[in-house]
Image (cartoon, rainbow, N blue to C red):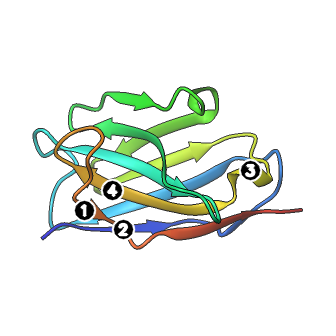
Amino acid sequence: QVQLQESGPGLVKPSQTLSLTCTVSGGSITDNSYYWSWIRQPPGKGLEWIGYIAYSDSTYYSPSLKSRTSISRDTSKNQFTLQLSSVTPEDIAVYYCARGGSAYVWADWGQGTQVTVSS
């Protein structure tokens, strides 16, 4: 059974870059046909998909966040990483990594990590 675990700083200063890593166990991020996503949930709001990196190493980002988002992977560590630049208080959320057999349906989730933006 695949397991995902987010890690990274819980506090980021405004205008800085948020960097989170998802460590995967029980499966490979290069396994055929899987999509590895980052999703967030701001307080009191619904889920917001940020982007994915596919098994093929292709990436696709939400149009609303594309200019600030980068997702990459380290196959030697079986990890994928989110970088979100120029953060503001609007980026405060619980951030999740997830796996899906398609781009926008996620069957496996990490537990989530809270990120706060504050000076």
How far separated are the C-alphas under marks 2 and 1? 7 Å
Q: Are marks 1 and 4 in contact (CB under 8 Å)?
A: yes
Disc 2 on helix, strand or loop? Answer: loop
The residue at which mark 1 appears reads as: 108
Residue visible at 27% across and 48% down?
Answer: 75
Please indicate whether residue 7 sits to the left or right of residue 80 in the image.
Answer: right
Q: Are marks 3 and 2 in contact (CB under 8 Å)?
A: no
Q: Between disc 1 and disc 4, whose residue precedes?
A: 4
Disc 3 on helix, strand or loop? Answer: helix
Q: Are marks 4 and 2 in contact (CB under 8 Å)?
A: yes
Q: Between disc 3 and disc 2, whose residue precedes?
A: 3
Q: Nearer the viewer, residue 60 or 8?
A: 60
The residue at which mark 2 appears reads as: 110
Q: Which of 38 and 64 is in front in this view?
A: 64
The residue at which mark 4 appears reads as: 98
As drawn, the label of residue 90 is 3
How far separated are the C-alphas under marks 4 and 2? 6 Å
Three-letter amino acid code at disc 1?
Answer: Asp
Three-letter amino acid code at disc 3?
Answer: Glu
Q: Which of 16 and 104 is in front in this view?
A: 104
Disc 1 on helix, strand or loop? Answer: strand
Residue 111 location (% of width, % of height): 40, 73
